[in-house]
Image (cartoon, rainbow, N blue to C red):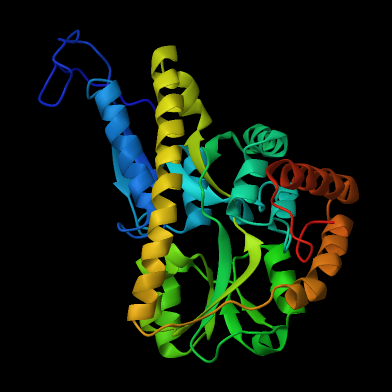
Amino acid sequence: MLLMVSCRSAGPGDSGNPLPVDAPTWEVRFSHVLSTNSEFHLLAERFRDLMLERTDGRFRVVIYPSGQLGGERVAFEQIQVGAVHMAITGTPVLSGWVPEGQMFDLPFLFENRDHGLAVMNGPVGDWWRELLLERTGVRSLGFLDYGFRHVYNRRRPVETPVDLAGLKLRVLQNATYLAAYSALGVQATPMNYGEVYSALQQGVIDGGEANVIGFVSSRLYEVARFYSFTSITYNPITLLVNEPFYRALPEDIREIVDRSAADALAYQSEVARRMEADAIERMRAAGVEISRPELGPFAAVVRSRIRDELAARLPDGAALIATLVEEAEREAFSSGAVDSVIRPR
């Protein structure tokens, strides 16, 4: 069983209340693919510290950053079989198991990161979490505030869709991502994240797509000096736990896991906004050329085309996408996040 139990008494750092000599402890392996100065790692550390404090040291999280245990696909396979207990993974990767999740990858679906996070934390996101659990035996504890993936490259600034033509970009191995970037003339190239830096150095690829924090925390600015806020795809990232491990925990520990995950996710959202601003300043200081293109021409090339293609690929795809777009529009109007150029329609 995934539950690893040992005998212990209260020790340094505990609350001071003596524990029964047979009180169980849990050793938890937590995997993510970003570096130790990323918002992923800060979330993992906050969750680790909260669990240690709230369980009197009984729930011990060991973090494996930078893809030490494998890329996102490998980590998810490990979490399914219990070799890893927890991980951070995006819905684009998880679409290999839950293809319906590709609808969240549709280009120019959300207005801004607040809009995207609100939709993912609403009924549509809850539906996807239940579907993930049913099909894979992995539970989502909630969504991170990651934001949009933007294009970076080592050849030229991207101001119009024409500037993307011919660029060989590392793109997530996801059918909707690949279709969207291919429609924009990109040579879309799937690749493990850990290989991107060296591939840029060697000229195997021209660039890729990532959010600002990931671009800076992985030091990609050293090998790619152009970064463009293309906002083509919003990237839902989720905190995962193996369901048999989770269900085997005592009820009070499960409640602490849920509460600590929610608190760590709230913390991640808070620090991610600050980290993004700091990352942009680091990019400028490093000589990265930053561009903010008009998004309308990009959306005109891919939005309708990719929605139609995905609707044809998914069972009941048209109905699923219509439900998502309706929810996105409702949330956009209720929050006031409406833009006539890229608003979902």
Position of residue 311 relative to residue 48, above or below, is below
Position of residue 117 relative to residue 138, above or below, is below
- Residue 180 appears at what percent x and percent y? 73, 71
- Residue 327 appears at what percent x and percent y? 78, 42
Residue drawn where x is 85% and y is 66% of the image: 304
Task: In the displayed orientation, state which residue is furthest to the front.
Answer: 336
Name the one closer to the observer, 301 or 25.
301
- Residue 245 appears at what percent x and percent y? 45, 27
Position of residue 158 relative to residue 88, above or below, is below
Q: Is residue 323 left or right of residue 110?
A: right
Name the one closer to the observer, 224 or 313.
224
Q: Is residue 50 left or right of residue 125?
A: left
Q: The N terminus lies in which quarter of the figure?
A: top left
- Residue 166 appears at what percent x and percent y? 66, 90
Q: The C terminus lies in which quarter of the figure?
A: bottom right
Residue drawn where x is 43% and y is 25% of the image: 259
Q: Is residue 219 visible?
A: no
Image quarter of residue 126: top right
Residue drawn where x is 58% and y is 61% of the image: 148
Residue drawn where x is 52% and y is 92% of the image: 155
